Image: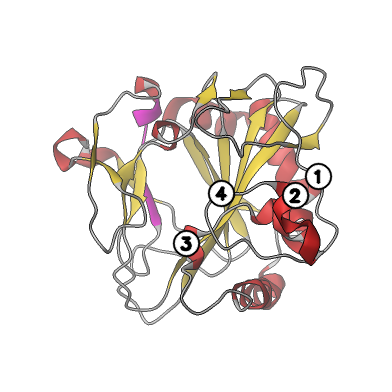
């Protein structure tokens, strides 16, 4: 889809150990610096389809709706990195944008993804693809290194309905080991990977630059979603085989539809393909 970085590779043994020990790895090359403009155009094309009153941060399931987004998530070099963590058989079940306009107050509070996700066993890898360069000034994601070792539910979350919060569940600052905070600075076209139990969040964008990342959520085929909590939960095979067939399957999108909310079934998008 986009020009691949000349230094593309697989995870090193050291990076695999870092993921296991720290819960993340970052600055993995995928797309060439020459592809930055194409990534910007990709975001512009898809985001421009949303009505003006809908926040792209509060939409999800792009991998079910958009063939272009689905194809991006099937970039072999991205899946190679994921395979190095999850093994040969895994599915995708989430695809989303996280966007901050220049000088915007949007905040993602400290949280564990596994707090939100009724998946058993808790085992998911999030790919975070930088559409634009991201750093501390424009609201890069931040993580607490090693916090995933406490496991899903290892931190107490409380509800906070602040208008600036993208999510409403927050881990209080007194639970954060501040000396272990790492900012996920990435160049456009690079990715990071993080564990679903890793504490993470992001601050406002205080710069004059856009910040946007594309997230892709993957789990091995032995992970099952609780349909009582997430009736919309569906998976798409990303690599390998799914002999277990524990979850409903989402069809591959055949065209370009636009998700207008967080959750939906793949069939909801058929009429627009």
First in residue order: circle 2 vs circle 3: 3
Name the spot of residue 270 as percent of width and height, x first.
79, 57
Indicate left or right for 14 with 88 as reference: left
Taking the magenta stretch, the answer to whether it contains residue 16 is no
Q: Residue at x 47, y 66 (%)?
A: 99
Labels 2 & 3 near each other (Cβ < 8 A):
no
Q: CA distance from mark 3 to mark 4?
A: 12 Å
Name the spot of residue 88 as percent of width and height, x first.
77, 26
Quick one: 188 or 120, which is closer to the camera? 120
First in residue order: circle 1 vs circle 3: 3
Q: Quadrant of residue 115?
A: top left
In the picture of the structure, the residue carrying the numbered disc 2 is: 267
In the picture of the structure, the residue carrying the numbered disc 4 is: 263
In the picture of the structure, the residue carrying the numbered disc 3 is: 57
Labels 3 & 4 near each other (Cβ < 8 A):
no
Residue 251 disc label: 1
Q: Magenta stretch?
A: 141-148
């Amino acid at each position: 889809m986009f020009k691949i970085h000349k230094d593309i590779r697989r995870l090193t043994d050291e990076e695999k150990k870092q993921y296991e020990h720290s819960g993340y790895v970052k600055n993995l090359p995928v797309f060439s610096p020459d592809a930055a403009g194409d990534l910007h155009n990709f975001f512009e094309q898809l985001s421009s389809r949303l009505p003006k009153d809908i926040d792209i941060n509060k939409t999800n399931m792009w991998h079910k709706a958009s063939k272009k987004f689905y194809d991006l998530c099937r970039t072999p070099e991205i899946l190679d990195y994921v395979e190095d963590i999850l093994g040969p058989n895994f599915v995708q079940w989430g695809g989303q944008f996280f966007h901050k306009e220049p000088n915007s107050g949007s905040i993602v509070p400290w949280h564990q993804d596994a707090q939100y996700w009724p998946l058993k066993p808790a085992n998911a890898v999030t790919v975070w693809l930088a559409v634009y360069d991201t750093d501390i000034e424009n609201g890069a994601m931040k993580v607490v290194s090693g916090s995933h070792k406490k496991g899903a539910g290892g931190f107490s979350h409380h509800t906070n309905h602040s208008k600036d919060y993208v999510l409403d569940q927050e881990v209080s600052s007194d639970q954060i080991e501040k000396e272990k905070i790492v900012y996920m600075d990435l160049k456009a076209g690079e990715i990071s990977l993080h564990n679903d139990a890793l504490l993470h969040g992001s601050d406002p964008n205080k710069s004059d630059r856009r910040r946007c990342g594309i997230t892709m959520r993957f789990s091995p085929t032995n992970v099952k979603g609780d349909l009582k909590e997430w009736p919309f939960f569906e998976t798409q095979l990303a690599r390998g085989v799914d002999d277990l067939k524990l979850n409903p399957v989402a069809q591959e999108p055949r065209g370009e539809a636009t998700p207008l909310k967080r959750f939906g079934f793949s069939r909801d998008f058929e009429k627009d393909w």
